[in-house]
Image (cartoon, rainbow, N blue to C red):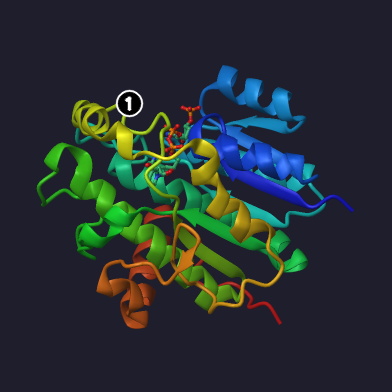
Amino acid sequence: MDRTAVVTGASSGIGAGVARELARRSWRVAVVGRNPERTNDVARAIGAIPFVCDFDRLGDVRALAKELNSRFDRIDAVVNNAGGIVATAERSEDHHELTLQRNLLGSVVLTEALVPKLLHTRGRVIHTSSMVSKLGRIDLDDLDFAKRRYGAGWWPYASAKLGVILYARSLAMRTGLESYPVHPGYVQSGFGSESRSGKIVLALSRWMQISVEAGAAPLVHLVDTPELGVENGTYFDGLTPDGPTHPSAADRTFITAYWQKLAELVDVPVEHHHAT
Ligand SMILES: NC(=O)c1ccc[n+]([C@@H]2O[C@H](COP(=O)([O-])OP(=O)(O)OC[C@H]3O[C@@H](n4cnc5c(N)ncnc54)[C@H](OP(=O)(O)O)[C@@H]3O)[C@@H](O)[C@H]2O)c1
């Protein structure tokens, strides 16, 4: 029976690398991207199935989840990888700060809708975070960054990537599904191309970047290694478990409080049945 992986942000960069390698390892892959042309090109090249979805619209994400649920009899892995930095303070049509929506809220809506299928296969969920999560600051009364400095998008980005770790851990705690957040490394991809400050940082530090294949490798490892031998919810820095991040990522009470706020923001149930 074909193992099936849903990979978001798979139309370029790290996600495309993950989709390519999983397809090579005989996984059936749902390539989820925003740009239709890029999404179709990647899917065609690796013999995968394309799905176009803009995470800036939660209605699109709900429709995607519905389509995936009806199209696939089983889902064994979800790789929540879509994201990036947003240059200017903007709100989505769903009224959320765009960085948070693009990097986390879309993944929350998608993953929560796929939980029943994942419980059935005892599937895994991998979440692309970042080492900048260390600099994140989460204010439970200001998840949408209305009251704080936007800082060319880096503060909301760091905070959203910290949120990714908290969400990954809350998913593990609530459902028992294996759920791992990961920093892929500093990867040469399309990252930062929508932001002026991102382009400058990239131009100055390109020599430090690793290839897309090297950035995809930790995610593929987390999807495709039968026994990882670590505590559920462990944050990986590349292939290394227990990467350095913000102390709040270890605070279970805070994780639960954060999850309750997230669930309220995107209107999903707070509780799920736990894997037995
Ligand atoms: N590159 C790094 O050094 C680095 C380090 C740490 C973490 N990350 C994270 O790694 C992930 C992948 O980024 P990357 O480096 O591979 O950059 P990338 O080449 O720019 O890829 C980003 C992917 O996310 C998709 N995406 C962006 N906004 C979207 C939206 N609104 N709706 C749906 N899809 C959207 C893009 O789709 P389209 O191309 O179709 O628009 C693309 O497939 C991101 O979450 C990024 O934050 C990157």
Q: Which residue is at a point 37% across and 56% down the rendered structure image?
A: 265
* Residue 25: image location, x then y, percent: 76, 46
Q: What residue would you read off at disc 1? A: 193
Depth check, front residue: 163 or 232: 232
**Image quadrant assignment for residue 202:** top left
Identify the image quadrant of the C terminus: bottom right
**Image quadrant assignment for residue 91:** top left
**Does residue 170 appear in the picture of this structure?**
yes
* Residue 228: image location, x then y, percent: 62, 71
* Residue 213: image location, x then y, percent: 55, 40
* Residue 168: image location, x then y, percent: 47, 65
Residue 238 placement, left or right of 33: left
Residue that lies at the very extreme toward the top in this rendered image: 37
**Does residue 67 appear in the picture of this structure?**
no
Depth check, front residue: 56 or 189: 189
Depth check, front residue: 33 or 231: 231
Image quadrant of ligand 1? top left
Q: Residues within 10 Å of mark 1 (few under 14, many from 20)?
A: some
Q: Ligand 1 within 8 A of label 1's CB?
A: yes
Residue that lies at the very extreme toward the front in this rendered image: 207
- Total tally of numbered discs in the picture: 1
Q: Which residue is at a point 40% across and 58% down the rendered structure image?
A: 164
Q: Vertically, is 113 above or below 272? A: above
Q: Which residue is at a point 54% across and 76% down the rendered structure image?
A: 232
Q: Secondary structure at mark 1?
A: loop
Residue 201 placement, left or right of 169: left
Question: As shown in the figure, which amino acid type bears the numbered disc 1?
Answer: Ser
Q: Vertically, is 176 above or below 117? A: below
Residue that lies at the very extreme toward the right in this rendered image: 1
